[in-house]
Image: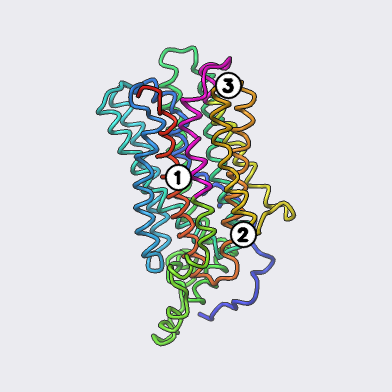
Amino acid sequence: MASPDVNAPPPKLEGKYAAMVVCWLLGNGCLFSWNSMLTIVDYYVYLFPWYHPSRVLTVVYQPFAVLTIIVLSYHEAKINTRKRNLLGYILFFLSSLLVLVLDLATSGKGGLGTFIGICAISAVFGIADAHVLGGMVGDLSFMPVELIQSFLAGLAASGALTSALRLITKAAFENSQNGLRKGAILFFAITSFFELLCILLYAFSFPKLPIVKYYRSKAASEGSKTVSADLAAGGIQTLAEATQDEENLRECDRLGNKQLLLQNIDYALDMFLIYTLTLSISPGFLSEDTGSHSLGTWYALVLIALYNVCDLIGRYIPLVKFLKLESRRGLMTVILSRFLLVPCFYFTAKYGDQGWMIMLTSFLGLTNGYLTVCVLTSAPKGYRGPEQNALGNLLVLFLLGGILAGVVLDWLWLIGKGW
């Protein structure tokens, strides 16, 4: 088969809008299961009142995600991206199904054994997240920025959708017997179906889109070995005409992970600091430490839903070119200034009313989404396909590392609360 012309753009960018929709859905699927578990945290707080589930589940989830992404990032250049992403979505589907099975098998009863089972499922979610998030961000880093922006918007949309569904199920079952449990069961039934849909979309639809095939062929021509299975699924066989000397020359010419990291250390720190701050406040602080207000049991759900909606809105702001922040120094300045939110949240929880808390939560979500898209769409510019893929994985490593640091720091809010 003839080599693709790497300089020619795909004809009329065929399949671009279809690819954006599929990326948005796949982004949803990457966090839908985990966000579902976080969003029904009021059910787990009811079942396990002494175990701080909103904090413990996140602490269990993140080390597995970070350790997995470290291994995958180190071996990124040799890993079959198709198998990696499919394995991640399959793990999401099976784990979501297991949440249902565990609840039905225990008849919705609490206890240490059930809580350990939920924690084990949370750990599997972390492993799945590392497979999919790093794999998809790396893969989309050498494609048009609209695709990675759609995927990142899908990540935030999963939070907004799960929050909206939770509010609906809470309202529907609030006055019925075992209303919390019925809502949670319905929630994970929907989640399992959606994860199955993502498996089918990634396996059969995404690799056959013309724009995706073009950019994967371009990456393969630049020396990427991770896209061969996806190209085959799209009906394109990778070329075997290059000699061993040419392959070795390409590998020597490609920047290594260490070089990429040194050249982009500020972007890596940006991702780490964004998520360190965000996860030190949401969801743990918003779920347990915001005081008592007129919204009662709805208060934490409303705050988390508001955070998720604003996070989603923030990820679309960079589409307006003059609103997108691309200055490396500017990004670092804004990200560091976000840490002023910590004393703001502390004093608002202690002395302020719910209006101020709602405003701060909205700002936290808006800046989280906006800065995430600015960093992940700016960093890969100027590199070739294999290097963009590797850099995407490295940035996800620091993102997950920031989440881990954030959920550990989140426990500091409990100081002086007698636990």
Camera-nearest label, 2 or 3: 3
- Residue type indicated by callout 1: Ile
Nearer to the camera, 206 or 316: 316
Labelled pair 3, 1 in contact (Cβ < 8 Å): no
- Gap between marks 2 and 3, in whole Å? 37 Å
Q: Which residue is mark 1?
A: 403
| Rendering coords of residue 260 (x, y %) | 48, 68
In the image, which residues are magenta? 273-300
- Residue type indicated by callout 3: Tyr
Circle 1 residues within 10 Å: few <14, some 14–19, many ≥20: many
Q: Secondary structure at mark 2?
A: helix
Q: What colour scheme does the image use?
A: rainbow
Q: Quadrant of the C terminus?
A: top left
Circle 3 residues within 10 Å: few <14, some 14–19, many ≥20: few
Q: Secondary structure at mark 3?
A: helix
| Mark closer to the chain start, 2 or 1 | 2
- Residue type indicated by callout 2: Arg
Kindly identify which numbered label has been placed on residue 247.
none
Q: Residue at x 43, y 26 (%)?
A: 184
Circle 2 residues within 10 Å: few <14, some 14–19, many ≥20: some
Q: Main secondary structure of the magenta part?
A: helix
| Rendering coords of residue 53 (x, y %) | 38, 29
Camera-nearest label, 3 or 1: 3
Asked if the magenta segment contains residue 298, the reply would be yes
Q: Secondary structure at mark 1?
A: helix
Q: Quadrant of residue 376?
A: bottom right
Camera-nearest label, 2 or 1: 2
Q: Which residue is mark 3?
A: 351
Q: Which residue is mark 2?
A: 328
Nearer to the camera, 108 or 375: 375
